[in-house]
Amino acid sequence: MIDIQTITNIALRAVKANKMRSVLTSLGIIIGVSAVIIMLAIGHGAQISLQNEMKSMGSNLIIVRSGVTTSSGARGGHGSQPSMKASDGDAIQNRIAKIRYAAPILEETAQIVYGNANWSTGITGTDNRNFIIKDWDLAYGRFFSEADIKNANKVAILGQTVVNELFGDVDPLGKTIRIKGIPFQVIGVMVKRGQTGMGMDQDDTVFIPITTAQKKVMGIKFPDQVKFILLQAVDAASTYTSQDEITSLLRQRHNLGVNKDNDFVIMNLTQMMEMMEESTKIMTILLGSIASISLLVGGIGIMNIMLVSVTERTREIGIRMAIGAKTWDIRWQFLMESLVLSLLGGIAGILIGLLGVELINHFSSFTAKVNLFYIMLPFSFSGMVGLIFGFFPAYKASKLNPINALRYE
Amino acid sequence: MLIEVKNIKKSYPLDGLKLNILKGISLEIGAGEFVAIMGPSGSGKSTLMNILGCLDQPTSGTYYLDGIDVNKLDADGLADIRNRKIGFVFQGFNLLSRTTALENVELPMVYAGIPAAERREKAVKALQKVGLKERMYHQPNQLSGGQQQRVAIARAIVNEAPIIFADEPTGNLDSKMSLEIMDLFTRLNKDLGRTIILVTHEEDIARFADRVIKIVDGEIHSDEKVIK
């Protein structure tokens, strides 16, 4: 039996003897491998940015917001039937064990002014539970105190973008800004969080106590009204199982009779995220599979050239057989040649694929991310393609009759 | 006996008929003999040569090579016996192109599974024996016909195979080179004791052998010692 080093040398020599042909043959594999790497990287990148987004939103989240009104068949949008109160959230947190925190949220966009700088940003009335749920820390300063909430104090915590726009290099702590003309004292600045996967700047925001928002800044239709309540369940499963309890508690608190529809909507963000994650996974698989079709086509190209190569070298095969080459000696020789072609194509494909990923990250809005598995997958696939499509030509070569092969001109 | 052939026949189907190439040949060749097989083209001498060289198998009859029943071997068994027992020298040289003389000579040992270092050493020695050590890094297209045939001979002897089959070894060479090659065969026979079976249609080439077997129409016509 022939040794692997000799057989590799024979294969490398055959590949080198026809440089141009080898490059063109490998081209299919090169394109296939680089396409698979780029496609998987795009899918993987989407998955990672989604995961990052989930992390910054907080985990195991449920949102309960006001329901919709229907007047003579025309349905209003979300929140068109204000019904949620901050105290609803407190009740949910206290009475339902599967819910750990409930943060009231009341928000609107407003113009804020410091000195002669001004900036339009989102104002969120909430309390400290919002920061706990989102796992978001202060860069410096302090959170709201109990007194701030109880007395509806005019204090504000700023996001980094707001600090940059209004204060530049000045230390904002203790300074007074005006929100809709009302003076607020800055008590804290949040850690920078960056953009969400959808491109929203999370740092372009101002937090004020929920009570201050309700009583002094935003117009509300009834006391203690909020836009929605952000709930954090104890675990992912509870985001599903707690929904019935929340519904019955709220129906009871809102005095809804048996025939009345809910005046609130429960949205399970965990479920939404899981669905989105599932769909990006499917997208990744789909992109990868489509790209791997080109790998298969590349394999057919290799088979084609290997068949030509076997025919061209019929005489050589005859000589080798006459001298003592056995069936598998001949098979391995041609299998190794197609394996070398496909693996060299695979290596070139990896390099071009990585280059392509770099270019995508530079020049497009997609984030493409590679990992070792997504590189080794198409590479080993290319090796498999080489072996599978190389087998038929190798089989054909090994079945030649030595006498006829020696006579072949 | 090194080669023992009893009543071998070979036929091919042709247009529904059976074409009989060999019609029952029996012969024995002992170790160290130098035999020439002669015959006009179409006589079946090439077919006999292929069967004796284990490249082909007879339709019927028995063939023992060095005590091995060749008819019982499959393709890989035949390859193995060709590798260990037989060295081939062809009319058209049949060297691998774009491959140095040295690597061509190493080839039988590659398939015998001999380690690379030992292969090299033996190949150099074999090339030395045929007087081509200085050309061992030349490729076939850089060598003359006679030199190419000497590389082929080195390849045939390198594995220490007891039998050398030479099929019209001088067919592509001029008379001066033919003489050189035949001298080489004679030396291999006399000095190294290799059994040589030579197929030729030229009388003066056959005269180098000690025994001439003439094949006519698929049968042995004569089998005589050469008187020198």
Image: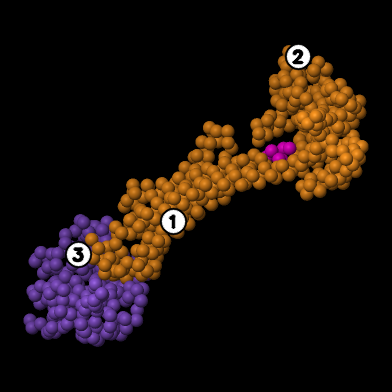
Chain colours: A orange, B purple
- Residue behind mark 3: B92
Q: Does residue A373 sit above or below B163 in this rendering?
A: above
Residue B178 placed where, x, y %? 12, 68
Residue type pointed to by label 3: Gly
Distance (Cα) linking label 1 and label 2? 70 Å
Residue type pointed to by label 2: Gly
Name the main secondary structure of what is drawn in magenta.
helix
Q: Which mark is residue A386?
A: 1
Q: Which mark lies nearer to you, 3 or 2?
A: 3
Q: Quadrant of the C terminus of chain B?
A: bottom left
Magenta run includes residue A217: no
**Residue stretch rendered in magenta on the structure:** A52-57
Q: Chain of mark 1?
A: A
Secondary structure at numbered mark 2:
loop
- Residue behind mark 2: A115
Give B31 or A248, whichever is nearer the viewer. A248
Q: In this rendering, do the residues under marks 3 and 2 share a single chain?
A: no
Residue A110 placed where, x, y %? 76, 21
For the image, the number of numbered tags is 3
Crowding around mark 3 (Cα neighbors within 10 Å: few <14, some 14 to 19, many 20+) is some
Taking the image as drawn, is residue B121 in sight? no
Dividing the picture into quadrants, the one containing residue A395 is bottom left
Q: Which mark is residue B49?
A: none
Q: Are marks 3 and 1 in contact (CB under 8 Å)?
A: no
Residue B194 placed where, x, y %? 22, 78
